[in-house]
Amino acid sequence: MHEHDLDLIAAAAAADPDADQQMAATLVATCDLCRQEWDAQRTAIAALAAAPRPILDDLERARLHRRVGAALETELPSTRPAQISPFTRRVLAVAGAAAAVVAVLGVGSLLRDGGGTVATVDQMAPEAGADLATANQSFDTEEDTATLQGGIQVPSTGGAESTESTAAAGGTESTAAAAGAADNTNRTASELAAIRLPEVSPSRLASRLLALRDREIGRDLSSEETALICVDRVGPDRPGSEIDLVALLTVGDDEVEVYVVVNDSGERAALAYRTSDCTLIAER
Amino acid sequence: MTDERQRDTELVRRFVDGESRAFDELMRRHEDRVFAVCLRVMGDRELALDATQETFVTVYRKAHLYNDQAAFSTWLYRVAVNTCYDQHRRRARQRTEALPEGMEPADPTAGDAFESVELRPELEVALAAIPVDFRIAVVLSDLEGMALQEIATLLDVPVGTVKSRIFRGRRQLAEALGNRTGPAPRPTNLETE
């Protein structure tokens, strides 16, 4: 009984030097199925060989460059930490500004001075607060994500009292979630008040926030990039949690990296590290 | 190592060292070919543009993970193919979610990425009709001219699997084309050409 070696036929049809051409010729000459296979392979090869390679037209090329540029505007370069430019760090800080406010307010309730007044967004940076308020018009947040409009409220968790600020613009009340953790700092509210958010126009901030809606970007920042100085501390400090957002801030003369993390249960927490030595200065 | 490969490797090294212009040059050198692969796999210029964009964004983010044991182009096209796979899966999932419960598409190829109504050459329509694994193997082999070993490396499968996918892909492609181009010349002796 004749055995149909269709792989041999296919290889021979493609002029594979390893194919036994004589055997293939014999099979094609004597076997209908083998002949059909030969025809099919040669038909496909001929059609593919005649196909021109498509190229980008000028408009598509321009769009591609513009879109890649826009997508990368919020990215850190794949470089070592020492090579991060101040601009890049600033861009990251801008991109994470919304989370920064969430985190900082969360940190703020840790930094409170014995139940005294907590710094509001207005006290920290009125201009940035207004920017955030405007940016939120384009920031379609998820349910578990901070919603930033005029006023910001941090709901209490783990026994902590909630913090509320008045509206920087519009007076609309909204909430920002941050899961609880033990207070490990004795810093005061005055230090919190010294925190400066990046100066940025509403339109630029809005575009950064839109970009951050892509959770893959957030994951990529957290898991792949080495540019964040203290990122390796987050895992041991919060095992099993995933970094959701990152912000770089300046507190006095110190640079601070704030990581908003989320655990398997969806609980959020904010960890603030001093960049110079990666000391955990506050968590919430 | 070829001049082209050396040049790519040098550009990646410069980019990882912080020279952003090197990334621009890498993109210029490869964007047409990446787009061509994405278009052949996705079957739609807009989807291909999306995949090309995503590919270069990924390359930007992950360039530091590239090691020069394989050609940069192999690594790049692996990223492109994986991006196409991801987009294909996402679109398939969206289609599934869009269907009313219990309803299946009447035509198994109707929901493929090649579903826009614009007219396309029959080859692209035929390519759309074959499974994506076969399509990618055929595209890389017969349209991009890659060697079997390079495709195997790119797809992370054995060479035999690549061969099998190409053969079966061509077979199904021919069926989709309906052998409209007429009978192929057959071997009458030891030569096939």
Image (cartoon, coloured by chain):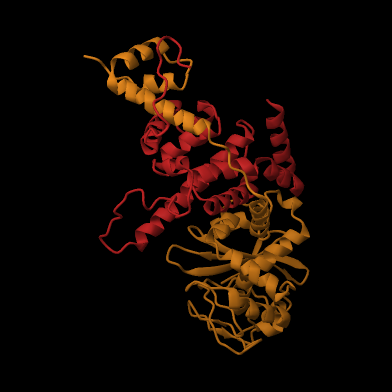
Chain colours: A orange, B red
**Residue A276 on image: x %, y %:** 73, 60
**Residue A132 on image: x %, y %:** 65, 77
In the image, residue A235 above or below residue B164: below
Q: How many marks?
A: 0
In the image, residue B71 above or below residue A121: above
In the image, residue A126 above or below residue B129: below
Say which residue appears at 52% left-offset and 53% top-offset: B47
**Residue A268 on image: x %, y %:** 51, 69
Quarter of the image that includes the N terminus of chain B: top right
Pick the front one: A162 or A130 = A130
Say which residue appears at 52% left-offset and 26% top-offset: B149
Residue B19 visible, this angle: no
Q: Is residue B128 left or right of residue B13?
A: left
Residue A85: which quarter of the image?
Answer: bottom right
Pick the front one: A224 or A103 = A224
Say which residue appears at 41% left-offset and 9% top-offset: B189
Residue A279: which quarter of the image?
Answer: bottom right
